[in-house]
Image (cartoon, rainbow, N blue to C red):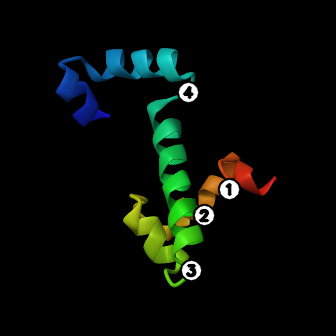
């Protein structure tokens, strides 16, 4: 978030509100969704890659954080 705010020359608070208004969700939620979509794409197209390495490759700090996305209903493709 800090990098995005700095890039546009806005405060973090203003950038956060603007993103929420435009996207209808927080920056963190949006970013998590983008990362999960990318992970799904990699998994589908490269069955040799394991989920732990995919999680790190798409930007999750830990494999556990990646798995917790399921608790937040990000994995809507499974329903």
Q: Mark number for residue 67?
A: 2
Residue 41 or residue 9, whichever sits in front: 41
Q: CA distance from mark 3 to mark 4?
A: 31 Å
SS of the residue under disc 4: loop
First reached walking from the N terminus: tag 3 or tag 1: 3
Mark 3 or 1: in front is 3
Image quadrant of residue 3?
Answer: top left
**Percent position of residue 9, x then y:** 17, 19
SS of the residue under disc 1: helix
Q: Circle 4 sits on which residue?
A: 25
Q: Is residue 74 left or right of residue 19?
A: right
Q: Residues within 10 Å of mark 1 (few under 14, many from 20)?
A: few
The answer to whether marks 3 and 2 mark residues whose Cβ atoms lie closer than 8 Å is no
Q: Circle 1 sits on which residue?
A: 70
Residue 41 or residue 11, whichever sits in front: 41
Q: Residues within 10 Å of mark 4 (few under 14, many from 20)?
A: some
Q: CA distance from mark 3 to mark 2?
A: 18 Å
First reached walking from the N terminus: tag 3 or tag 4: 4
Specify the quadrant that holds the N terminus.
Answer: top left
Q: Mark number for residue 47?
A: 3
SS of the residue under disc 2: helix
Q: Image point 55% across, 27% down: which residue?
A: 25
First reached walking from the N terminus: tag 1 or tag 4: 4
The answer to whether marks 2 and 1 mark residues whose Cβ atoms lie closer than 8 Å is yes
- Residue 75's place in the image compared with 21, above or below, is below
Q: CA distance from mark 2 to mark 1?
A: 6 Å
Mark 3 or 4: in front is 3
SS of the residue under disc 3: loop
């Amino acid at each position: 978030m800090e990098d995005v705010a700095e890039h546009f020359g806005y405060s973090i608070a203003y950038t956060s509100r603007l993103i929420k208004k435009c996207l209808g969700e927080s920056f963190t939620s949006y970013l998590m969704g983008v990362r999960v979509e990318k992970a799904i794409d990699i998994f589908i197209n490269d069955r040799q890659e394991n989920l732990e390495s995919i999680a790190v490759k798409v930007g999750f700090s830990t494999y556990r954080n990646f798995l917790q996305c399921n608790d937040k209903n990000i994995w809507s493709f499974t329903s």
